[in-house]
Image: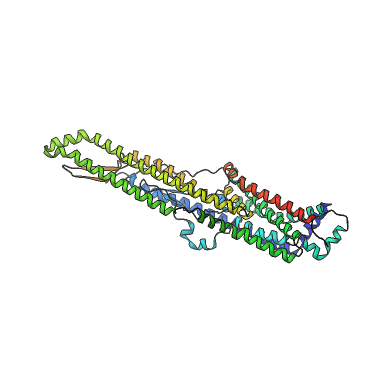
Amino acid sequence: MWTIIAEKELKEHLQSARFIVTAGISMLLLIASMALGIQHYKGRVAQHDQAIQMMLETAAQQTNWNMVPAAAYRKPDVMEVFVNGVNSDIGRFSEITLMRNVRLVRSEFSDDPMLAVFQFLDPTFVVLIVLSLLAILFTYNAVNGEKESGTLKLVFANGISRAEFILGKLAGGWVALLVPVVLAFLIGGLMLILMGVEMDAAQWGKFGFFVLASVLYFTCFMLIGVLVSAFTGRSSVSFLVLLVLWISAVLIIPKASTMLAGQAMPVATTDEVESRLASFATQARTEFFGGMQQRWRERFRPTEGMKPEEATQYQAENRPAWEKEDQDARQEMEKKIADHTARSYEEYYNQKNRQEQLAFSLAKMSPASMFQLAAMKLAGTDTGLKRRYEDAMKNYRDQYTKFVQQKGGGFGGMRITVGRGSGGSVSMGGSQEGTKIDVGEMPRFQSPQYTLGEALTASLFDLGLLTIFNILAFVGAFIAFLRFDMR
């Protein structure tokens, strides 16, 4: 019997002007957001390729590897079409130099503040805001509206049980909401193919799980709508209650959780960390160069009474040992800086992770936060995106630095010029001066891989919480209707 109720509910929705308007708006917004996302993604890919090409063209004009303006660029991911996440908030590239720490700079929002004002209209935003509101609009009077219209008594006059009725209502309303959403995502997937956006199997899998998360999310608000409708006697009251719940869940709880976590666990800003690291590195290098100059003065002191040819012979005999000693001292200094930097960043990231975990734990009282976190983790546009790229760029910096040192020799292109007495200077040079470098030898930055398995592992807990929330809402709606006063 519940199937008859479901069919009746579905037909009523499909034939109503409310369904036609709302379903049309939701489909239009989802399709438009995906179309805009595809265009933005293709523009980012072109910008990324152009930036790399310009860097290589500039590098090809150099005669010294130490003068190459090396940089690592963050490669766009097609999953940004569906979940922009923190993609536009973090930087797009980092300079790769021995003297500077890796740091992503020049985010889209910093280059174009207007984008930061209005944010992106991506499918996640449409699902998060629009579909949840539509779910409330469809279900706020699912039970008490039937009572107010007098149809509830007529239905139960036919000997239908309460369990069958509520199951039919839920199934019919759910299918009515599901059809336009799935259809819009299918059209979006077709657009990806027709517009020439390449996606591998892992990315299609992430897209499929994103659709599943979207279905779980709007189902949750649909069940909450039925639950509140069964708890209240009038549809106007249930609509106001649901509106307050929606505002709290979607707008207040996520932002309040971040603010509370920031107050409970304050963490130094990146600029403060960078400033402390720069001061430490400057002091270490100043001590190193001061010590090196002092060592060279001591080394040349014995030549003060020698004839020029004797001094030249003395320098030639001892220069390899002197340079080896300076090389060891420089490596010890760089290791000291690198170890201090690694410890500082590890401490910073650990503090930041604890702060984020607290914020996310508080935010997960809301199904909106569960969905948003799951979606970002599936797409790889979560807060871990910055950490993944900066770690990969640090590894690339080590690789590139070794390459430059091999090409330049000595101190990675550092040349020591000495004279008699206390004279001496330090200059930058290289073994290839006068001949343009071959950029084909230059090691290329490889973007970090974010596999489907990693995405599912990261999002599984949030998807599980959202599923449990759905189950609790379903049980609550079922029990509430069993106790509903139909008089």
- Identify which residue is drawn at 49% across, 46% down: 388
Q: Quadrant of the C terminus?
A: bottom right
From this view, report whether residue 144 is shown above or below residue 394: below
Q: Is residue 171 above or below residue 149?
A: above
Q: Quadrant of residue 184?
A: bottom right
Quadrant of res 287: top left
Q: Is residue 358 left or right of residue 299?
A: right
Looking at this view, name the residue that lies furthest to the front: 264
Picture mark count: 0
* Residue 382 visible in this rendered orientation of the protein: no
Given the current orientation, which residue lies at the most extreme bottom position? 236
Q: Nearer the viewer, residue 181 or 157?
A: 157
**Residue 361 percent coordinates (x, y):** 58, 51
- Specify whether residue 236 is in view: yes
Q: Place residue 180 in its image quadrant.
A: bottom right
Q: Is residue 466 above or below residue 306?
A: below
Residue displayed at 28% across by 35% down: 324
As rendered, which of 221 and 186 lies closer to the eye?
Answer: 221
168 horizontally vs 251: left or right: right
Which color mode does the image show?
Answer: rainbow
Describe residue 261's horizontal placement relative to residue 53 as left or right.
Answer: right
Name the residue furthest right.
158
Relative to 89, is 240 on the left or the right?
A: right
Q: Give how far across and how far down residue 451 sits, in percent.
A: 56, 42
- Measured as percent of width and height from the top left, residue 421 is found at 16, 42
Q: Residue 64 at x, y = what percent?
A: 32, 45
